[in-house]
Image (cartoon, rainbow, N blue to C red):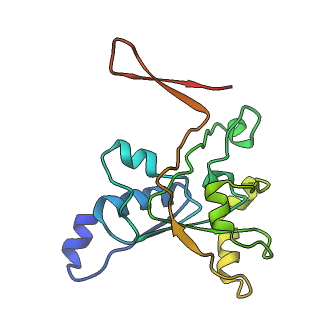
Amino acid sequence: MYHLVREQYPSSQIWFTGHSLGGALAGLMSHRFRCPGVTFESPGEALFASRVGLSVTDYGHIYHFGIAQDPFFTGDCHGPFSFCALAGYAMETRCHGGNICVWEASSKATNTTSNVLTRQGYRAPQSFLYHRLERVLEFLRDKKRPVPRCIRAPPECRDCSRWTMLEHPTKRDVIVRNKV
């Protein structure tokens, strides 16, 4: 599809955008074709991108917007009794490539983006209700709510932190085991 659009409009700048899974795919396409991208509440795509050979460290032209209380965006959608598990999801992918821009549901919070990313003294109450596209559109339309400060995604981010990766003693395959 990208090549067809590029062929049809050779002098145009192509942007990728999307929400949720569509946002993760838009992020991957931005990485792959080195085009600007804006995602909304997408799960982290950095782990998958690195596994298919895409670099995620040098892409300052991708911006991931999300709400601090959205467990899909922050990678906090895990555990046997979480809504995600009950619905059949396991979302522990919080690492993004590019820039991260985080809103706090409370308009009084400050410095939210860096707090969410580093997890230093910050724990927002999580709810899948913050994952709705309507909520993001409310935040975008609210003139009293400033656009969040964006920061580069930290390179030391680790997805699936509750998992232990073990190398098989005789094979090069990686064995994955969940810490419960």
The picture quadrant where one finds residue 150 is bottom right
Please tell me which residue is depicted at 35% across the width and 62% down the height of the picture.
Answer: 58
Q: Quadrant of the N terminus?
A: bottom left
Q: Is 80 situated left or right of 75 in this image?
A: right
Q: Position of residue 8 (x, y in %)?
A: 21, 76
* Outermost residue, top side: 170
Q: Quadrant of the C terminus?
A: top right
Q: Position of residue 143 (x, y in %)?
A: 70, 88
* Outermost residue, bottom side: 143
* Along the viewing direction, whichever of 147 and 127 lies nearer the viewer: 147
- Relative to 44, residue 88 above or below: above
Q: Is 103 situated left or right of 61 in this image?
A: right
- Residue 143 in view: yes
Q: Position of residue 124 (x, y in %)?
A: 77, 57
The picture quadrant where one finds residue 171 is top left
Please tell me which residue is depicted at 71% across the width and 83% down the height of the picture.
Answer: 142
